Image (cartoon, grey):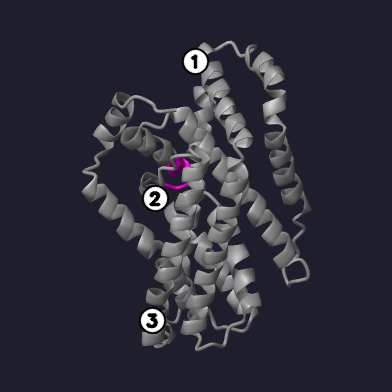
Amino acid sequence: MNKVNKKNINYYSVFRLLIIILIAFFAIFGVDYGALIDHLTARLLAAMVLSQVVVLLSLTLLSFRLSLFIDKKNPPVIASFKAIVLAMGFNLIIPGRMSEFVKPLFLKSKVGISMEGGLSSVFLERVTDMFIISLLSSVVLSGSFVDFDGRIMICAASVCFLLLHFLPKGMPWVEKGVAFIPFKRLSSLILNILEHLSQAIIDKRLYGGFACGCLAWCFTVSSFFVFFFVAENGQFSIDKCLILFVISTIAYAVPALPGGVGTYEASIVFVLQHYGYSMEHSLVLAAALHLSQMLMVGLLAGVVVVREDLTLGDFFGRAKAVPSRG
């Protein structure tokens, strides 16, 4: 088992190293820095600043969604907001989705939400996101210059939704199945998570959270439109923004470097060059857009860390010490 894990880690390290080498090679030999500087304008800076308002609205709606998934009667909105910006902030320095574990840990340490409740809420976040993105991808990319068939993604997300919908009725059979797991702590954890998921379906929290998620993604798309509308002096259509958003979101999910650095920019450059933008202009827009997406999150995460006096050591200690509220 350990040997397999070591091999996986090595392959992943090699993959990240290759990404870094490719970025370095491109930065040295593939960019005309004179032309690059010409595209750094005050309008670009204004686009980055103005898009922050929409980014903040999106974060707020994501916080409402998480808090609804946790508790419909007493949603911990403020704690959920802090948990989300912390997780997104950690994602800027940790590759992959490991930062998602920050949410249940923070929520347990601050408002006593059980780990099972936190993990089940994060799972509901991911399922609703997958459904929204897969549906949007299929609609936006079908008929575009990208050869994309999103039926598999939609089917997978739909199956997850159906399984969740019928989970409360199927809990007796699920409990019997989980009972066969030989490890008691693992089976208990899985059962508790499934019970929280089942209760979320019974309380209709899934559907309220899904509505908040849809609105949050609408604001995220709007942040793209605001950025490009201002940066390109109104010469950028909503259709192009939607294609850029979908492709860059898929690229961001590739677990390469922290914060999606490299893959995110490459996807945007690819799309913009298809629309006739030069390499340098595309690169400046891609880097500025990515920075504008990270700016608010980075600042808010820093504020939360300072205000809550968080360190990695006592973070886990507090989570263990605080009794669970459910």
The picture places residue 135, in percent across and down from the top left corner, at 70, 57
Residue shown at 48% from the left, 76% from the top: 227
Side of 28 relative to 123 (left or right): left
Q: Earlier in the sequence, mark 1 or mark 2?
A: 2
Element type where label 3 sits in the image: helix
Q: At which x and y percent is residue 307?
A: 22, 49
- Which residue occupies the extreme front position in the image? 73
Question: Which residue is label 1 attached to?
Answer: 185
Above or below, 12 against 43 in this view is above
The 10 Å Cα crowd at callout 2, few under 14, some 14 to 19, many 20 or more, is: many
Q: Amino acid at mark 3?
A: Ala
Tell me if residue 208 can be seen.
yes
Which comes before the other along the chain, label 3 or label 2? Answer: 3
Residue 310, position in %: x, y? 25, 42
Residue under label 3 = 46
Q: Could you classify mark 1 by the number of other residues whose Cα lies within 10 Å: few (under 14), some (14-19), or many (20 or more)?
A: few
Question: Quick check: 152 left or right of 312?
Answer: right
| Residue at image location 58% in from the left, 66% down from the top | 245
Distance, label 1 to label 2, CA atoms, is: 30 Å
**Measured Cα–Cα span from mark 1 to mark 3:** 53 Å
Does the CB distance between marks 1 and 3 fall below 8 Å? no
Q: Is residue 209 left or right of residue 139?
A: left
Viewer-nearest of discs 3 and 2? 2
Q: Give the quarter of the figure containing the C terminus.
A: top left
Q: In the rendered structure, find residue 81 and report the number of the disc placed on it.
A: 2
Q: Which residues are magenta?
A: 87-100
